[in-house]
Amino acid sequence: MDFLDRHGSQILGLTRIIVGLLFLEHGLAKLAHFPPVPMFANGPLPPMILASGAIELIGGALVAAGFFSRIAAFVCSGMMAVAYFMVHFPGGFFPILNGGELAIVYCFVFLYFAAAGPGAFAINNK
């Protein structure tokens, strides 16, 4: 598909921006309670949730902007691997049953961004 070959960098850049913004939204929900998520609304959050929220907020912003995106994506990928094994895997082996599909997808998409680079539209495009 010649069209996709010619625009690979732009598609990678748009995918990076969208995934970064979606990840940032998880951090905003945990730290700023926006949008309000009932799971995070009841009192002070445990330190592990606060740490993950900070990584999601800062890492998502860096990935979306394309600023130190390879390093940020690598950290976000690792955080999602840890999140899967700490939170989801104890609930069962199959991701569809333990609710871990999104954690796995984020883990490997961020790992791809770390390896492939930011694509187009990045602040520090290297």
Image (cartoon, grey):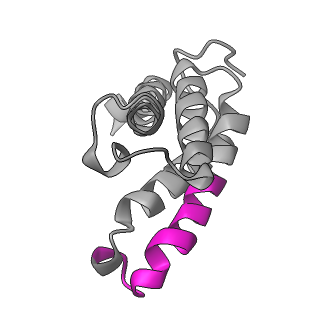
The residue located at (63%, 40%) in the rendering is: 73
Q: In the rendered image, which quarter contains the N terminus?
A: top left
Q: Main secondary structure of the magenta part?
A: helix
Q: Name the residue at the front extreme.
A: 43
**Is residue 89 or residue 124 the one in the foreground?**
89
Where does the image place residue 58, in percent across and percent down from the top left?
A: 60, 29
The residue located at (36%, 76%) in the rendering is: 95
Give the magenta-colored segment's residue range. 78-96
Does residue 41 appear left or right of residue 116 in this picture? left
**Is residue 100 or residue 34 the one in the foreground?**
34
**Is residue 4 or residue 60 the one in the foreground?**
60
Where does the image place residue 30, in percent across and percent down from the top left?
A: 44, 39
Does residue 69 appear left or right of residue 19 in this picture? right
Q: Let me know if residue 6 is in the magenta part.
A: no
Q: Quadrant of residue 115?
A: top right
Q: Is 11 rendered above or below residue 1?
A: above
Where does the image place residue 100, in percent across and percent down from the top left?
A: 39, 68
